[in-house]
Image (cartoon, helix red, strand yellow):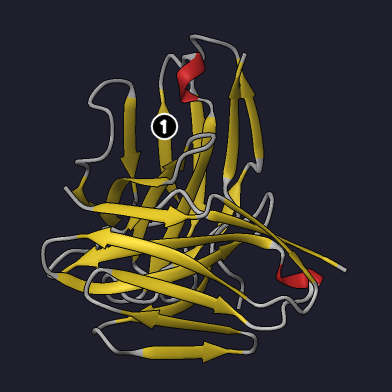
Amino acid sequence: EDQVTQSPEALRLQEGESSSLNCSYTVSGLRGLFWYRQDPGKGPEFLFTLYSAGEEKEKERLKATLTKKESFLHITAPKPEDSATYLCAVQRSNDYKLSFGAGTTVTVRA
Amino acid sequence: NAGVMQNPRHLVRRRGQEARLRCSPMKGHSHVYWYRQLPEEGLKFMVYLQKENIIDESGMPKERFSAEFPKEGPSILRIQQVVRGDSAAYFCASSPVGPDGYTFGSGTRLTVV
């Protein structure tokens, strides 16, 4: 069974204080690793898909990287509007289901 | 271009009643997925449907739960004889051609009292 573990569970940052979130995974035949952002009372919002080890993707203050066992989401100089829960999910080859981690809740204080 | 529309946003049911959750996929999307998010847990896959077909319902409890995606109209997730443990947020996602490009709706929050 696929396993996705995110750490830490919660992260409190000062505005401008860069940090990283971790997503460790075990999956048989990875097709893709996904990062989503979820605001309270909303559905997950797609951020990135990573397909192979060594791949990196960036969007504004966020950068996602992938190795064979884990992915990192780096938040550079965060702002209060980056406060959200960040979800990691994996998808197997020849499958359509996503297996999600429990998420990391990030709070950025001004 | 409206996103994935789910209604109602909030639903309160007494134990033993039926709950019907609706999902209208994005225009042009013919693949619908339902996920459930329990408090303090990650999203869990429930069922994958295409128009008039259930492709995979392996994540859905075998009793009391059913799903459909008719030729016309929204996808429906139906929970019969609800129990307190069914209280959760139910999210629908849609995609145009299979697993890529999931877009999630804002969810229906079911509370069973």
Q: Chain of mark 1?
A: B
Tell me where residue A92 sits by quadrant. bottom left
Percent coordinates x, y for residue B67 in the rendering: 33, 40
- Looking at the rendered image, the quarter that the C terminus of chain B falls into is top right
Percent coordinates x, y for residue A81 in the rendering: 77, 71
Look at 46% across and 53% down and name the residue there. Answer: B92
Query: Image height check: is A78 above or below B57?
Result: below
Look at 32% across and 89% down and name the residue there. Answer: A55
Query: Image height check: is A67 above or below A36?
Result: below
Give the residue furthest to the right: A110
Percent coordinates x, y for residue B73 in the rendering: 45, 54
Kind of element beneath mark 1: strand
Drawn side of residue B86 relative to residue A3, left or right: right
Drawn side of residue A46 relative to residue B48, left or right: right
Q: Which one is in front, A52 or A91?
A: A52
- How many numbered marks does the figure carry? 1
Q: Which one is in front, B94 or B45?
A: B45
Q: Hey, what amino acid is under mark 1?
A: Arg
Query: Image height check: is A82 above or below B110?
Result: below
Query: Image height check: is B8 above or below B101?
Result: above
Look at 53% across and 33% down and name the residue there. Answer: B88
Q: Dot 1 corresponds to which residue?
A: B78
Look at 21% across and 52% down and name the residue there. Answer: A2
- The reply to whether residue A15 is visible in this rendering is yes
Q: Which one is in front, A34 or B78?
A: A34
Percent coordinates x, y for residue B1 in the rendering: 60, 78
